[in-house]
Amino acid sequence: MSALGMGDPTIGGEESTGGEATQGLLAAVLDALTAHIAIVDPSGTIVAVNAAWRGFAALTGFPDAAGHGVGWNYLAVCDGTHGYGAEWARAAAAGIRDVGSGQRAAFHLEYPCHGRRDKRWFQMRVTPLQVPGWVVVAHESVTEIKSAQEQLAGAVAQLASVRERLQAENVYLRGEIDQSQTSGELVGGSEAMRGVLHRIEQAAPTDVTVLIVGETGTGKELVARAIHARSPRNARPLVSVNCAVLPANLIESELFGHERGAFTGAVARKMGRFELADGGTIFLDEIGDLPPELQAKLLRVLQGNEFERLGSPVTHHVDVRVIAATNHNLRDAMAAGRFRADLYYRLMVFPIEIPPLRARWKDVPLLVRHFVRKHEGRFGKHIEHIPKAVLDSLCAYPWPGNIRELENVIERAIILSPSSTLSVEDTNCDADGQSAEPAEASSRLAEVERHHILRMIRECGGKIKGKDGAADRLGLKPSTLRSRMQRLGISSTSGLQRGFVTPG
């Protein structure tokens, strides 16, 4: 039996039953290969071909009177080619002779084939067998090879994109885990809160754009999370962006991403929040603070779900549900030219207004108990009793900082309570420490709010902004607190004279 196992007497094969079985096995292996394969002996005669070769021979017009090329001298056919293709045929014959004689380890040639109306390019590879002088000639369609290479390159690029996205999501979600562990849930049974919950249930199953409107600290992000959690997109992340805290020169990069070198400091490509939210939901908090130059780009995403990264001309398409929130009056901002009218109407598809805590004071006892359960373990405390007088006092207070302020007060109360009974500092004390009457009438709300702000400023040593400043403790932005101070007649000058307020 020869190294080829063909069972041909001219090759030195055997006519045994074992030889026939081996020959059949080799034929099956060759037929399983997609390349067009022929085995050529030292004289240039074709001694074996596979099924793909027979189809190839018919395609190219190669003589097949003796079994689709078997028995024909391949070198003679190549040498006898004239006219178009003669150059490639002579090169092929020379390559086969060089490999058969050992002058080359292998031979490679690309050539055109015009056996059909369409012009196709093929790749010919010649490699030696273990028997001296014998070679394997294989032909493959270059078009098919390149198509496979392109498909492979596309798959690799897609995998790289998925890998990049997963890495970016992991970085983002690691930060979200800490936030989700400390964020609360929607609590309340008042009529105002039941209306909000009903609107959430209406919006959640749809992909409609939602605009959440409410004062600072009312829980707008909790509403956005509730909508996402009840939506068909809840298997994908909810990506949050606070448009008020990001510098204007970084918001575009944060939203849409950037390429390496897009600007100074862009040392690597970065995926934007819209790409991270693909298939899920993006929450644009404080949308009223978005710079005018970015409002047009946001409008384009809302209308066509497409954008470009900074520094790239490539358009990206995403499938994202948008929920926005603001504590500003966007109609006033639109009238003043600070907010685009077309973006306003695009966002106002399904508005949800969150009432301030003073308008849902009946929910205060529920919220107090919720925050006690949420935080008592953090401080190693166990609160068993909340006096009615404490709840009445908390219900009477107008809560200018809304739920965020209430939560801060309860955290402080848990820390300061000496026993299992919750003890809350009197929120209705004025700046001189005198007890004020409960703010039951609307005419008293402003006065109580004024007293509380003055007291908070005094406790913070006159500090307005920064960590442990009055704005931070009230759950307000410094600009919002200053605006309320101006409205309530608390000026920086008079505050300094009284020892309450420091400049800035």
Image (cartoon, helix red, strand yellow):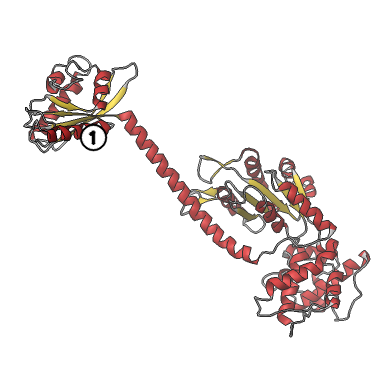
Residue at position x 34%, y 16% in the image? 117
Q: Quadrant of residue 65?
A: top left
Residue at position x 90%, y 73% in the image? 438
Residue at position x 52%, y 50% in the image? 271
Does residue 5 appear in the picture of this structure?
no
Does residue 240 appear in the picture of this structure?
yes
Instruction: Pinpoint residue 219: horizontal percent, then vertical percent.
Output: 73, 60
Q: Quadrant of residue 10?
A: top left
Quadrant that contains the C terminus: bottom right
Residue at position x 67%, y 45% in the image? 295
Quadrant that contains the N terminus: top left
Please state which of residues 148 and 121 is positioned toward the viewer in this rendering.
148
Instruction: Pinpoint residue 185: horizontal percent, then vertical percent.
Output: 70, 62
Residue at image mark 1: 29
Q: Is residue 122 above or below residue 306?
A: above
Instruction: Pinpoint residue 208: horizontal percent, then vertical percent.
Output: 70, 43
With 480 as the anchor, is 392 left or right in this view?
Answer: right
Q: How many marks?
A: 1
Q: Is residue 12 above or below residue 215?
A: above
User: What amino acid is at disc 1?
Assistant: Val
With 483 as the anchor, is 65 left or right in this view?
Answer: left
